[in-house]
Amino acid sequence: MKEQIYKIGEVSEMLSIEQHTLRYLENSLKIKIKRDERGDRLYTDSDIDTLRLVLKLREKGLNTTAIRLALENTEEETQPPPTETVSPGPLVTFEFVEAVSLVRQVSEQNDEIIRQNRLLEERLKRLEEKLDRYSRERDQNLDELMQILKGDGNEGKNKSWLSRLRGK
């Protein structure tokens, strides 16, 4: 039975995405699509299934790198097993890839929160230093005002309190 072959326009309509998006996915994810003698892309049913998986992973929020890793792992699973008997490793499933992606996202968010927390602590420290400086200046100004109001001995006897406050 001969496998069905589709051109890029047909696949674009089937998946409801633009042709340039298909070319982008092929290049960025290193998907190998067969070509004819003119260089036109020839998609098989298996290629379309791969693209559907890619679109589903993108909808779930995975980035290009995570999708590429998932595709590489699924390609390794589909390759025939070696002739030697080797205990099979854990199978990489969609849920596993999704879990790894979520762990990465949480880790990145955690790092961002820690960075923002450090920035806020630095700001808080600067604000506390400003507050202390303003408090000292206010206390100093109050002390000077009290000295002026009390009248510093003979110096201020003939002057009014306003002129003493202004320092004239």
Image (tube, rainbow, N blue to C red):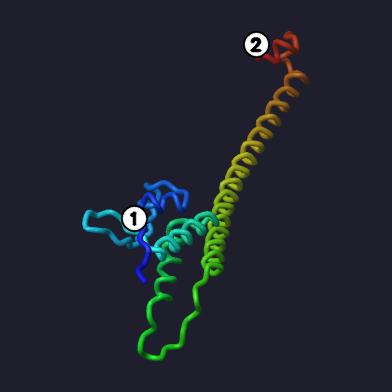
In this rendering, which labeled residue sits more in front, label 1 or label 2?
1
Quarter of the C terminus within the rendering:
top right
Indicate the amino acid at tag 1: Asn
- Numbered circle sitting on residue 168: 2
Q: Residue at x 57, y 50 (%)?
A: 118
Q: Is residue 106 left or right of residue 38?
A: right
Label 2: how many Cα within 10 Å (few below 14, some 14–19, many 20+): few
Query: Residue 2 placed where, x, y %?
Result: 35, 69
Query: Residue 146 placed where, x, y %?
Result: 75, 24
Q: Label 1 vs label 2: CA separation?
A: 81 Å
Q: Residue at x 70, y 24 (%)?
A: 144
Q: Residue at x 72, y 26 (%)?
A: 142
Q: Nearer the viewer, residue 32 or 49?
A: 49
Q: Secondary structure at mark 2?
A: loop
Q: Is residue 166 left or right of residue 76?
A: right
Q: Nearer the viewer, residue 124 or 149?
A: 124
Q: Is residue 108 left or right of residue 37?
A: right
Q: Which residue is disc 1 drawn over?
A: 27
